[in-house]
Amino acid sequence: MTYEPVIGMEVHVELSTQSKVFCGCSNDFHAPANSNVCPVCLGMPGVLPVLNGRAVEYSVLVGLALNCTISRWSKMDRKNYFYPDLAKNYQISQYDLPLCHDGFIDIEVDGKTKRIGITRAHLEEDTARNSHTVAGRESGVDFNRCGVPLLEIVTEPDIRSADEAYAYLSSLKQILQYLDVSDCNMEEGSIRAEANISIRPTGTEPFGTKTEVKNVASFSGTQKAIEYEIKRQTKILDDGGTVDQVTMGWDADRGVTVTQRSKESAHDYRYFPEPDLTPIVVDEAWETRLRKSMPELPQVRRARFMEEHGLSEYDASILIADKAAADYFEQTVSAGAPGKLAANWIMGDLQALMTEKQGTINALPITPGHLAEMIGLIEDGSISGKIAKDLLPEMYDSEKAPGDLVKEKGLAQISDTSVLEQMGADLIEANPGPAEDFRNGSERAIGFFVGQMMKATKGQANPKLANEIMRKLLQQ
Amino acid sequence: MSEPIHLKSAHSLRDAIRAKEISAREAAEAYLDHIDAVDGDVRAYTDVWREPALARADAIDSQLAKGEDAGPLAGVPIGLKDLICTTEGTTACCSELLKGFRSPYDATVAEKLYAAGTVVLGKLNMDEFAMGSSTENSSVVTTRNPWNLDCVPGGSSGGSAAAVSAHECAISLGSDTGGSIRQPAACCGCVGMKPTYGRVSRYGLVAFASSLDQIGPFSRDVEDCALTLNTICGHDRRDSTSANLEVPDFTTSLTGDVKGVRVGLPKEYFTDALGVEIRAKIDSAVKVLESCGAEVVEVSLPHTEYAVATYYIICTAEASANLARFDGVRYGNRAPDTQSPEEMYKKTKSAGFGAEVQRRILLGTYVLSSGYYDAYYLKAQKVRTLIKQDFDAAFEKCDVIVTPTTPTPAFRIGEKSDDPLSMYLSDIYTISANLGGNPAISLPCGLTESGLPAGLQIIGRPFEEGAVLQSAYAFEQNSGIDLGVPTAIAESVS
């Protein structure tokens, strides 16, 4: 029998606000353990939370980008459970009235657009981090992360394959990066994805029993875990078994999902409205102000890159996928470079150079202005494309302007006809054999002379000019 | 011989200290000596800060010597209920679980009282985590009623009430979730006020039930109550539920006059449940107000009979979450030698929490549980709205509501400890003001034949503490009632 997978995603996003969601502590990951803590986020007796308005704004921005309805009136709730990483033994979250709800996101898979419904996006606080020493049988808790604002984004069960799940996560990450509301660093846990997966016989309506897959450290890992889980469930059903409703963990080393928790041990979270906080009211004026402050989103930008800069859909898609790269591209174009050339250089040699040097586009020593200047030098014939390829690493290392480097190193292209004619005459005299070959009709011989000329000028001869001159001299 | 220092009201002591007739140190020493003399009987304090108090008093004296303004309560010795966080001493909520706990910060009210020039003498006894009506649930000691040492002082702020009544401090702070200021004030014969919910910052008040808790003062007269409110009220950005409203000077409400004030008597409060002796005291009190120009009207609060049930669902639900943090992980007394987090939680909480606290956590957990939430918690929230609406409707017909504070005077120690339901009914007249969020005061309205105080409760519209104080002051000034020094400690005082 063939089955159709039905997948819904829950993504937790840490918002990159200055301070935590309910206190003034710095929202900084890399600080020494328990250095960004205060009585409030440690859950000391008598403390009260105060909601960070910026965290609400970031959440609303995401909601708007995901085409959600923003609740005029929502509230925080207490989610009760016991765990040492939860300072108060309840998490302040949102239960029945999320800040954002009923939106959608359009994703592209195999060149086709698909709409994924967004059920809700709600604000909550992150937990602390536990660590354990095996030898000493001791556990430690780092509360720096406790109280970091977290946005939980839940989709409808609209996803039908691991590839769609991957596309959804990538599109969501792009949007978050464009909004500049999260570091989006999956390894550090600033985006955490969970998938709810079930399968049903193709063509039938009712949902099968779902399993939840957690603990995946990358988008591609999520994709693999979903693929694995679909296969696992398919085998169970084909063998006449039933799928248990369980929470699975992804074991990346072995490439398998492992049962973590059964439904029987599911929590009763005893949600109730948080009495220490007043309702969150986002009035029309606030929503409008945030809507106006929204940056251009990836899909709009892609269309504009194609239209304004004449890029292909493929090039535009690659460029907009990384906001920093797209920004760099636009700055290069503003500095005077033609769009297509700028895109080729950025996606080609520059990307290769960054990979080699392990650099990032955010901290690139080559400014967009320098790149544009270099492209200009090629365009006006001052340097050849080949010289430019060699020039790029020098620009990277020295942070100097390409024009200055060309002068400094004497890399300017030789376009002086008399110099090249003299050189050509000398080459013919020194190589009578190949000259004879040409006269006997061998076109390849002209390549030999142009090559020799480039070698003699260390590549600085204008290749087009060199070709013309050699042909003229040999035909005389 | 002039009046002993500890018999003076806070405002007259403050005036004498400002006039340099008495030094702040003399005042602190007088009170500390008096604590030494009587607290062995009364047992109001859980921790006396002798040295810090004297150092603080000296600092006030040197401020005054330099001609500086040392604050509106300069040199006034006060006490704080053991659930108000202070960096000085311990804040244990009279629980084994928090025994020895030192708060890393000061509550907003503590900061405000320090800034006003008060000298804190120490922490006061209470029912563990403010859960109780007799102070018998304290893990430290049972406080005794200064009017009869065999009786309870009421609760949960029993230590705060007994200390003021026994002249062991001029003013104290307590907290009131369902009557925990007013009921012990009535039992001990002093003035106790619960301001409007949101009037006083709860930052640094260890939470029992967040939507009901409110800090308020105990004092020996209404003027001291108004003065203390002037200091502790006001918006605090650290408490989102604190009201961002101007705080009036409450002493301007103390006119002694209630001409044209409409006093409402809710018929549901004057039933057979009310003891005849207390009823007679309230009837006379109403006559006093009438004689001062008040107009008496009957009003109705039809959902009163549901108040106690509603309260015990909401307060236990909130408490079950609020007390979850006391797990021994970050602070407090962790049970030793446990092998798993679950075992650590169970053993820590079983050993650290007393029976009443455990009972309320279990009740609260139950009413929030899946399948029971709608029938209990949600229903209780709806009834709470009806109770608020009752008040709104009644306050269209009157300006203040007058009721007894308690159905009976203080009961004997041990009398109700095995009967939680009868204990819960001690708060039958006070709970509605917490559910409605209204301000309410209790002040003495006489002694029963057995020599125990009776309390008169005056409830106002939200944020109209002034109207409550106006009627309370008029009654106090015109009733001719002055209970004097409590009988059980009178010997030590003279």
Image (tube, rainbow, N blue to C red):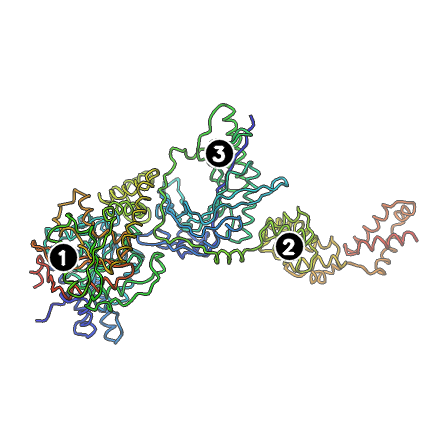
- Secondary structure found at label 2: helix
Image x and y of residue B367, in percent = 30, 41
Kind of residue indicated by mark 1: Asp
Determine whether label 2 and label 1 are within 8 Å by CB.
no
The 10 Å Cα crowd at callout 2, few under 14, some 14 to 19, many 20 or more, is many
Label number found at residue A329: 2
On the same chain: label 2 and label 1?
A: no
Label 3 sits on a secondary structure element that is strand
Separation of marks 3 and 1 at Cα, in angstroms: 75 Å
Q: In the image, is residue A123 above or below residue B258?
A: above
Foreground of the two, B86 or A403: B86
The amino acid type found where label 2 is placed reads: Phe
Residue picked out by circle 1: B283
* Foreground of the two, B290 or A236: B290
Q: Whole-Å distance between the Cαs marked 2 and 3? A: 41 Å
- Mark 3 in CB contact with mark 1 (< 8 angstroms): no
Q: Which residue position is annotated with label 3?
A: A257
